[in-house]
Image (cartoon, helix red, strand yellow):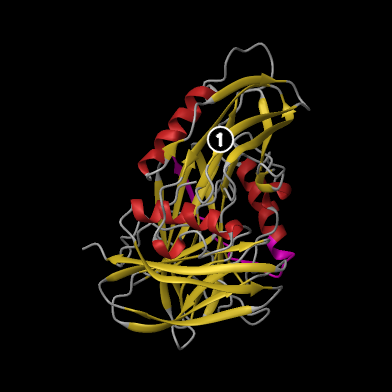
Amino acid sequence: MRDPLRCVPLALTLLAGCATARPSSAPTTPSGDRAAPASVTSSPRAPVPELAERLALVRQAFRARGAHPFEEQPVMFLRQGGAQGSTLRVERPQCLGFTAVGMPEMGNLDLRVLNGDGVELGHDTRDDAHPFVRACVTAPSTLFVMTSAVVGTGEIALLAMADPPPLAPPLGDVLRDRPRGVANGVRTPRGALGRDPAVRPPAQAIETALASFSARGYRREGAVVSGNMPRGRSEQHPWELTAGRCYTAMAFGGERVEDIDIVVRAPSGVILGQDVGLDARPEVAFCASQSGPHAIELRLYSGSGEWSLAVAEAPAPDRLLAPGALPDRLRAAAVAIDASARSEGWAIASAPVLGSAWIGAEHRLPVTLHAGECYRYAAVAVPGVVDLWLTRPDGALLSAYTGARSPAQIWACPTRTTRAYLHARTPSGRGEFALWGYRQEAPR
């Protein structure tokens, strides 16, 4: 997924947005208290029958979790790469939920929600077709909802609801959509149909990925390794790596590869990182604690065919994230975030804060946000995930991320200098976490 990095505080013009974020621990709407009628600028029209059926399934799934959808659903037609905004008026303090429902061919949809001042209240830019944003307001407000078609072309219905749950139901299961990997394109049916043009050969795809990493300061480590494997087979490949440095191992499967995993082991045999997600494009960030040959194992669980494997060395991080500043298992994710942030002009503004993570524990840090500057906060947790949100002293939510994975990142560009509180919470698991921030001059 994209990792947009900048938030420009211009009312309703913030279209090149931020990373995945969903509000959490914000004011909740009393049970059964329906939202006030909202005016939507998009011209409402009835969805086609198949989309109407999908919309009904989604509405029923949210209703089972206590949500109350609005009756009116604006339907839009978006081409791949296109976006359309809708404006809603909320007359009293409450929380609203937003989700976009498309036809099965819509592979990736994004949602962003902003208030009338251009402050982002939440967005979901994960690589899936079922975005969900929960946004809360503490006073009558105008909300701007931007729907983007990242992959796919077709009709999309925007569903707004009162009393939304903190997390969306499993919409992929509700709609019986096949899960998509991070880089999997739309696939044709199996059969003698020739090469699927939507899936690039793995050697070509991995060169493109390495070029993207190079733009963030990474350096290719060794040569690309390619091969062909049947289902159920695993292979190990040695990579000579240096202690104290951080790396990213990545692999791409061909058009007939549906699920391939990566496991990275140190010379001692200790597992440094692994990606066992259900996709054909695994990626692992890790830091080497020993010099010598590291074993990178590929396991092909579903499908068969060609694959390519490569390793990229991360640029030397800021001194605040240098070896010894963080435990290696936290530092790997932190260095990856740092490389991306610094390539976009962000400067680290605070040393990492380390903490113990346990279920439901919340940590709160006071921060000062200065007018004319943008701020970016990041948090990583091992194991488990971490929620991250920013509030004003009166409790008003400025930015939040409550996704289902670590790391978490949020952004804020205040229009006036203000005190704020940075919150971090681990909703599941026990372990440790690190939290730090960046800043840069706000775009004009």
Q: Residue at x 30, y 65 (%)?
A: 440
Q: Is residue 209 visible?
A: yes
Residue denoted by label 1: 240
Crowdedness of circle 1 by 10 Å Cα count: few (<14), some, many (20+)? few
For the C terminus, the quadrant is bottom left
Residue occupying the far right of the picture: 232
Q: Is residue 79 visible?
A: no
283 sits left or right of 317 in the view: right
| Residue 66 lies within the magenta run | yes
Q: Quadrant of residue 159?
A: bottom right
Q: Can you say whether 291 is above or below 368 in the image?
A: above
> Can you give x and y, in whole percent of width and height, for residue 303 in the image?
72, 25
> Camera-side residue: 321 or 30?
321
Q: Amino acid at mark 1?
A: Glu
| Residue 290 lies within the magenta run | no
How many numbered marks does the figure carry? 1
> Camera-side residue: 293 or 12?
293
> Can you give x and y, in whole percent of width and height, for residue 60 in the image?
71, 58
> Can you give x and y, in whole percent of width and height, for residue 414 in the image?
33, 74
> Can you give x and y, in whole percent of width and height, for residue 68 in the image?
64, 69
Q: Residue at x 48, y 24 (%)?
A: 204
441 sits left or right of 349 in the view: left
Mark 1 element type? strand
Q: Can you say whether 137 is above or below 131 in the image?
A: below
Q: Residue at x 28, y 80 (%)?
A: 416
Q: Quadrant of residue 191?
A: top right
Q: Residue at x 68, y 69 (%)?
A: 427
Magenta residues span 62-78
